[in-house]
Amino acid sequence: MSTPHSPLGRALDLITRVRGVRGAMVVSRADGLVVAEQLMEGIKGGALAALASSLAGRLQRAMVSAGLGPSQFWHLQCDQGALLVVPAGEGLLLVAVTEADVNVGLVRLELLRAAETGA
Amino acid sequence: MSDDVKALSAELAGDPQSLVFLRLGELLRQKRQFDAASRVAIHGLERHPHLADAHDLLARILADAHDYERAFDEWDMTLRIAPQHIGALKGLAFLYFKIGDLTQAEAHLQAAKDAAPDDPTIEQAFAVIRGEAGATLASPPSPAPHPTSPSLAPELEAPPARTRPSGAVTPLPDERIFAGLEGAQEGLLLLDLAGLVLGGALKTPDGRDVTDTVAAYLAGVSQEAGRAARLLDLGAWRGLSAEGQGGHVYLAQPTSESLLLLMRDRSLPLGRLGLLAQRAAQVARQWLERQR
């Protein structure tokens, strides 16, 4: 989807380099389509992008209605792993899928850093 | 700045993950530098949100600064992490004593005594309480059985049930969902999967009631979270947290047919928000079971 030397590729590289990250992707917020991805085999990128975008949209509307402003990071904790999402510029979302024992704080930082650099 | 504060500060700067913040915070508390002590404790809690001694430290600082509401919350949290924490049991006894609830004060002291039978300060505190028992409660007592050193207690029976000792907060009737939970009237929401409100309420920071709007937006979140977890082979989802510019939210699933939302401002670390939400979910689960 993206070359390793493109800005998107570099951003995903940094995220997937964290131990316990199974994959990362850039998703279009508006239509839930994959923009770029680096996923381990078996992860269905297209379906994940659609779900992540839809969930992010619901949370965004709920948080703005609650007066908390737009969501800057969200974290779905599951028994065997997690899904982490950060909004990036130009209507994009950065998504990471992780194992259960990942350093969530580190992945969050990499996601935020990548979002800041305009992934 | 004294040498010992300087030394501990330097040690902490060299290793921010270190637990030396406990000693530094305690030292600053003893020097009555409550703002600095509080900052140290809060930074420590951001790195170690599940450390009972860190919550106990912050509670002692807050109690010394006469912020009893928040001190209660911190000691309450300490006991949720370490149910036999002597410092927290003595601290809560102190707060109950301050408001004249001698029964609760004695119950907490008894739990502390059971955990640390050789602690002489507990007997002294008992003496103070028993001395007050016959007197009028109109004037709150000033000498207090205040905890002096944080410590983890050995395993024991759970402490007595607690209710917030505050004259400022109107107690909720027991049958209400979330009764006794902090912020039940403005930052907690229980809804069904269709987005209909079952209990709690949400208000914006400027006081607008947004309960129904937020509930409607959250309809379907539970199913989508479950679908994402299944798609990724991640097992069941346990919680969904989100950081906003003006605060955090945490979603939990008390039952397969309900969703709970806890909302707080950014001063509450996300890890602690998760703990509070799981506690609220447990209360909600019990309430939902009683409705069947």
Image (spheres, coloured by chain):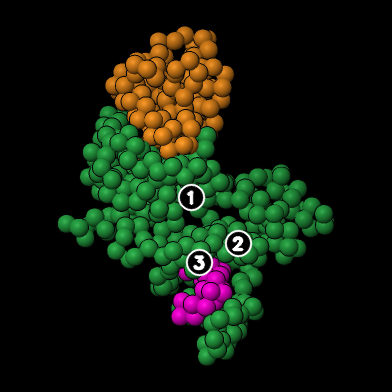
**Chain depicted in orange:** A
* Magenta segment includes B52: no
- Compared with B223, B199 (above or below) is below
The correct choice, above or below, for B35 with respect to A47 in the image is below
The x and y percentages for residue B144 are: 62, 77
Number of the label disc, if any, that sits on residue B67: 2
- Where residue B291 appears, x then y in whole percent? 20, 58
Identify the colour of chain B in the image: green
Give me the residue at 34% from left, 18% from top: A32
Q: Earlier in the sequence, mark 2 or mark 1?
A: 2
Q: Which residues are magenta?
A: B83-104
- Residue placed farthest to the left in the image? B292
Circle 1: is it few (<14), some (14-19), or many (20+) Cα within 10 Å? some
Q: Earlier in the sequence, mark 2 or mark 3?
A: 2
Q: Label 1 amino acid?
A: Arg
Q: Nearer the viewer, residue A40 or B262?
A: B262
Left or right, B187 with reference to B282: right
Q: Secondary structure at mark 3?
A: loop
Q: Chain of mark 1?
A: B
A72 over B237 or under it: above or below: above
Distance from Cα at disc 3 to Cα at disc 1: 22 Å
Question: For the residue marked with disc 3, what is the amino acid?
Answer: Ser
Callout 1 secondary element: helix
State the residue position of label 3: B166
Chain letter for the residue marked with disc 3 in the picture: B
Q: Which residue is mark 1?
A: B272
